[in-house]
């Protein structure tokens, strides 16, 4: 069986995380992805270290985002290299770029110029804050986007000030949104024969991520969300929603009627509260629940609460997650390698199509690790008659 996007050619002109992660999703679905990098240093992400760990000369972050791609090194200020890139654009199905607004136009590779080379091209761009406006000059960086989006006021506890998420959530989500737009444009092209321009930004992705809460805010007199002062997990949800310590770990409790939980916990104090108190006296109720849960291990509470249809779960760290049978059954890990260099242990695409994992074993060519800078320059340019 061929992968869903087999036969499609994607040019990845992007750096860092958001654009290259969209190209990764397309590669996992079977597209051929050629990463266009500057000669020598390549994508800046190659030396952007989350820790002091590198594999075969590149950061683990770069490996995570750029597996199953080919690399062509081109100097876009060199006329010969620029002509070669235009030749690739003329043959590509998708182009992904995340230059700062205005930069790619100055290189002569903006949307109109690319469309003149290839009317069927899907031209996908991701920026920090949109293509115009007072924030376009700012770096499109995850923490900065989180800070501008309002999302940092939903994390942490009341009185702590803004707290960012501990993930590059803006980059990752923008990559997913861009992939969605690319796939929609490819479907449209199948009907009309014409390419399209697809755009998103880190800020738009984060605004969309908050659609539930922003809708509540906009229709509730614009009252700001109030985080819990104790065990906050969602500023808009009442007790018992949160994560609580037990005698040997932590237990997560999801939304449920307070009376349902009170019927299963041994504390008489919880029976004194009704549903109207669940938000107005949220911190007080959470402290009562916490005092109960500390008395026994997590396993005890799971055995007691789950049969009563109380929505709960143990809180795992990565070692315990990876060791769990449920995780192993998903098959989300793989090992990829270069011709020369150490193997890279990484994740696999989250999609299954007709029972087969996208990318990795049983999927589309997921056995290749991220390429070296310009590793495929000679072979690719020769293949397309550009050298």
Image (cartoon, helix red, strand yellow):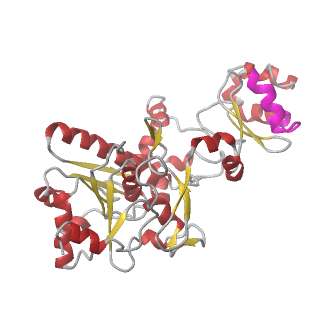
48 on left or right of 127 = right
Q: Quadrant of the N terminus?
A: top left
Can residue 73 be seen at all in this image of the molecule? no
Residue furthest to the front in view is 1
Q: Quadrant of the C terminus?
A: bottom left
Depicted 86 relative to depicted 299: above or below: below
For the residue pair 315 and 140, the one nearer the viewer reads as 315
Residue furthest to the right in view is 295
- Does the magenta segment cover residue 85? no
For the residue pair 246 and 324, the one nearer the viewer reads as 324
Extent of the magenta region: 290-307
Residue furthest to the left in view is 116
| Magenta stretch: helix, strand or loop mostly | helix
Q: Which image quadrant for residue 14?
A: bottom left
For the residue pair 32 and 280, the one nearer the viewer reads as 32
Pinpoint residue 381: horizontal percent, then vertical percent. 23, 71
Pinpoint residue 20: horizontal percent, then vertical percent. 39, 59
- Does the magenta segment cover residue 299? yes
Depicted 318 relative to depicted 56: above or below: above
Can residue 367 be seen at all in this image of the molecule? yes
Residue at (36% x, 73% y) in the render: 375
Residue at (52% x, 35% y) in the render: 223
Q: Which image quadrant for residue 90?
A: bottom left
Pinpoint residue 286: horizontal percent, then vertical percent. 75, 34
357 on left or right of 42 = right
For the residue pair 40 and 19, the one nearer the viewer reads as 40
Residue at (74% x, 26% y) in the render: 306
183 on left or right of 120 = right
Pinpoint residue 57: horizontal percent, then vertical percent. 51, 76
């Amino acid at each position: 069986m061929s992968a869903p996007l087999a036969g499609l050619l994607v040019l990845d002109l992007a750096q860092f995380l958001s654009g290259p992660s969209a190209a990764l999703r397309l590669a996992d679905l079977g597209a051929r992805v050629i990463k266009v990098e500057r000669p020598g240093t390549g994508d800046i992400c190659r030396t952007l270290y989350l820790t002091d760990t590198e594999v075969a000369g590149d950061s683990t972050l770069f490996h995570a985002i750029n597996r199953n791609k080919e690399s062509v090194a081109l100097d876009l200020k060199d006329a010969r290299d620029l002509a070669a890139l235009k030749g690739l654009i003329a043959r590509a199905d998708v182009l992904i770029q995340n230059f700062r607004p205005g930069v790619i136009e100055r290189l002569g590779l903006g949307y109109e110029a690319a469309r003149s080379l290839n009317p069927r091209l899907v031209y996908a761009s991701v920026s920090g804050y949109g293509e115009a406006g007072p924030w376009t000059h700012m770096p499109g960086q995850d923490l900065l986007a989180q800070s501008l989006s309002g999302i940092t006021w939903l994390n942490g506890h009341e009185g702590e000030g803004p707290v960012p998420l501990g993930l590059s959530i803006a980059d990752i989500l923008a990559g997913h949104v861009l992939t969605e737009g690319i796939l929609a444009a490819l479907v449209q092209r199948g009907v009309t024969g014409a390419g399209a321009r697809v755009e998103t930004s880190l800020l738009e992705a984060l605004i969309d991520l908050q659609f539930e809460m922003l809708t509540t805010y906009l229709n509730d007199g614009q009252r700001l969300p109030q985080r819990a002062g104790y065990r906050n997990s969602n500023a808009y949800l009442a007790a018992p929603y949160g994560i609580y310590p037990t005698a040997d770990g932590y237990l997560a409790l999801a939304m449920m009627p307070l009376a349902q939980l009170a019927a299963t916990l041994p504390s008489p104090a919880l029976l004194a509260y009704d549903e109207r108190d669940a938000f107005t006296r949220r911190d007080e109720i959470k402290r009562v629940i916490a005092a109960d849960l500390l008395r026994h291990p997590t396993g005890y509470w799971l055995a007691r609460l789950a049969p009563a249809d109380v929505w709960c779960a143990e809180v795992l760290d990565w070692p315990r997650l990876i060791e769990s049978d449920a995780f192993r059954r998903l098959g989300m890990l793989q090992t990829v390698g270069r011709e020369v260099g150490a193997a890279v242990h990484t994740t696999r695409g989250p999609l299954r199509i007709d029972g087969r994992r996208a990318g990795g074993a049983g999927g589309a060519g997921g056995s290749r690790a991220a390429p070296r800078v310009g590793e495929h320059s000679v072979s690719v340019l020769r293949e397309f008659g550009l050298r």
